[in-house]
Image: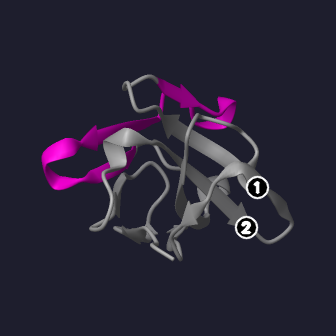
């Protein structure tokens, strides 16, 4: 199956920033909703942000005001700009494709392998 490919993760200090990318080469991302999820030991997988095919955006409460999701149609890439990072933002960040911006991970039909984000002093 086609899969999304994430990049941009790494180690960053608290208060720092990272920009994650989610790319696909065999389908057009702007025809779908694309969401970022994150998971970490001891925590349930949660949706972080989502962008619809029309460009509407949604954010999970813990990241509102700090994260921004966007799409560059020419590059067929969805981005997640993360600012003011906190240690609790640490986790494996994965992007996924759906028809609509659902909060339920099981409704997404294409997933990437994820990129690790670690926030630590």
Asked whether, in this view, residue 30 is left or right of residue 88, the answer is left
Residue 28: where, in percent of width, then height? 30, 51
Give the residue displayed 39% in from the left and 52% down from the top.
16
Q: Which of these two is toward me, 57 or 25?
A: 25
Q: Residues within 10 Å of mark 1 (few under 14, many from 20)?
A: few
Residue 60: where, in percent of width, then height? 65, 34
Q: Residue 32's mark?
A: none
Q: Which of these two is toward me, 91 or 24?
A: 24
Q: Which of these two is toward me, 21 or 32?
A: 32
Residue 114: where, in percent of width, then height? 52, 72
Q: Residues within 10 Å of mark 2 (few under 14, many from 20)?
A: some
Give the residue displayed 86% in from the left and 67% down from the top.
42
Q: Which residue lies under the disc numbered 2?
A: 40
Q: Secondary structure at mark 2?
A: strand
The stretch in magenta equals: 57-81
Mark 1 or mark 2, which has the lower sequence index?
Answer: 2
Q: Secondary structure at mark 1?
A: helix
Q: How is the image coloured?
A: one colour
Q: Which residue lies under the disc numbered 1?
A: 106
């Amino acid at each position: 199956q086609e899969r999304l490919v994430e990049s941009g993760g790494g180690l960053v200090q608290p208060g720092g920033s990272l920009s994650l990318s989610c790319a696909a080469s065999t389908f057009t991302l702007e025809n779908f909703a694309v969401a970022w999820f994150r998971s970490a030991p001891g925590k349930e997988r949660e949706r972080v942000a989502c962008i619809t095919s029309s460009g509407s955006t949604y954010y999970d409460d813990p990241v509102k005001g700090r994260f921004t999701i966007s799409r560059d149609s020419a590059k067929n890439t969805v981005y997640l700009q993360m600012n003011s990072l906190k240690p609790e933002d640490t986790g494996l960040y994965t992007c996924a494709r759906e028809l609509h911006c659902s909060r339920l991970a099981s409704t997404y039909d294409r997933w990437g392998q994820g990129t690790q984000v670690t926030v630590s002093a």
